[in-house]
Image (cartoon, helix red, strand yellow):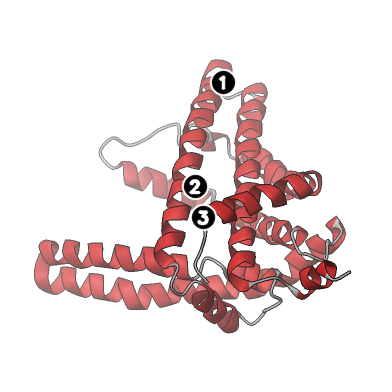
């Protein structure tokens, strides 16, 4: 089946419109509130580390993330559950919020296992050749191999982009099987999917930059006090929630288009 970008966007907006209230509830719990809490727990997150060593800024950033890594890790886990629960809300059998959250919790470990497999695989397949090229052939060869690896990375990420809906909507909790099915579903559509994701990403990035500037302005005006952190954290949380809901609806629409109608959808057609 050839992927249709226009149809995917139309179906994504339809999914969003039909489920906006319930999606907002889950996004508020798992995306907005955790981001707001993180802004209060890690005040420097809004403006970066207060003191940056001009001679070694990378070391400063590494120290910052090492010191606050546990909070970013917990946020990532909570948001993963939230994203999986959001996808579950878009199932054709129309689950309740509680059922969707339970699905998200059940799917979390298999989903993390699939992500770990991808990361380890990329480190071996792409990371090792880049390291060898840089070590043996010098910086020039390392850059060339690195560019090839970057293209391969983008291709692979497109191929595995449907793992989460395959697990949640397709019911495939085996990480290997979910990765294999995502690869199969995207066959022949990788370039179209990349173009679709790229256009979506550009649009979101522009909006994020604008909101980020507004958020930074509020924090700068109010300072690192409670009011500034609340406003900045709330704006970041809203942006993260909107982005999460949008990307979930898009991924679900892409998956439904490429996988075909579910049993529930077919049954409703003949009722």
Judge left or right: residue 139 versus residue 257: left
Count residues near mark 1 (Cα–Cα under 10 Å), then give few for <14, some for 14-19, many for 20+: some
Q: Residue 21's spot in the image, x, y percent?
A: 80, 44
Residue 244 visible (yes or no)? no
**Mark 2 lies on residue:** 200
Residue 160 visible (yes or no)? yes
Q: Say which element carries label 1.
A: helix
Nearest to the observer: residue 64 or residue 6: 6
Foreground tag (2 vs 1): 2
Which residue corresponds to the image point at 49% horizontal and 26% vertical from the top-left? 213
Q: Say which element carries label 2.
A: helix
Q: Say which element carries label 3.
A: helix
**Farthest front residue in view:** 270
Looking at the image, tell me whether mark 3 or mark 1 is earlier in sequence order. Answer: 3
Q: Residue 37's spot in the image, x, y percent?
A: 68, 41
Which mark, by number, is residue 5?
3
Marks 2 and 3, how far apart at CA: 11 Å
Looking at the image, tell me whether mark 2 or mark 1 is earlier in sequence order. Answer: 2
Which residue corresponds to the image point at 45% horizontal and 36% vertical from the top-left? 49
Marks 3 and 1, how far apart at CA: 37 Å
């Amino acid at each position: 089946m050839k992927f249709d970008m226009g149809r995917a966007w139309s179906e994504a907006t339809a999914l969003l419109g039909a489920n906006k209230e319930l999606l907002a509830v889950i996004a508020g719990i798992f995306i907005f509130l955790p981001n707001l809490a993180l802004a209060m727990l890690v005040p420097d997150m809004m403006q970066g580390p207060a003191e940056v060593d001009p001679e070694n800024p990378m070391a400063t950033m590494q120290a910052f993330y090492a010191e606050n890594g546990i909070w970013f890790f917990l946020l990532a886990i909570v948001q993963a559950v939230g994203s999986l629960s959001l996808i579950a809300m878009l199932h054709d059998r129309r689950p309740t919020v509680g059922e969707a959250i339970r699905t998200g919790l059940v799917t979390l470990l298999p989903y993390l296992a699939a992500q770990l497999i991808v990361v380890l695989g990329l480190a071996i397949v792409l990371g090792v050749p880049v390291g060898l090229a840089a070590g043996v052939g010098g910086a020039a060869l390392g850059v060339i191999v690195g560019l090839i690896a970057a293209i391969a990375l983008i291709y692979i990420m497109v191929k595995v982009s449907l793992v989460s809906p395959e697990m949640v909507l397709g019911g495939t909790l085996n990480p290997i099987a979910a990765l294999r099915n995502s690869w199969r579903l995207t066959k022949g559509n990788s370039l179209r999917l990349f173009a679709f994701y790229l256009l979506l990403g550009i649009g979101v990035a522009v909006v994020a930059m604008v909101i980020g500037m507004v958020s930074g302005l509020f924090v700068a005006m109010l300072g690192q006090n409670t009011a500034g952190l609340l406003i900045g954290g709330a704006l970041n949380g809203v942006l993260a929630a909107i982005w999460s809901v949008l990307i979930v609806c898009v991924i679900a629409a892409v998956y439904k288009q490429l996988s075909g109608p579910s049993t529930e959808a077919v049954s409703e057609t003949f009722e």
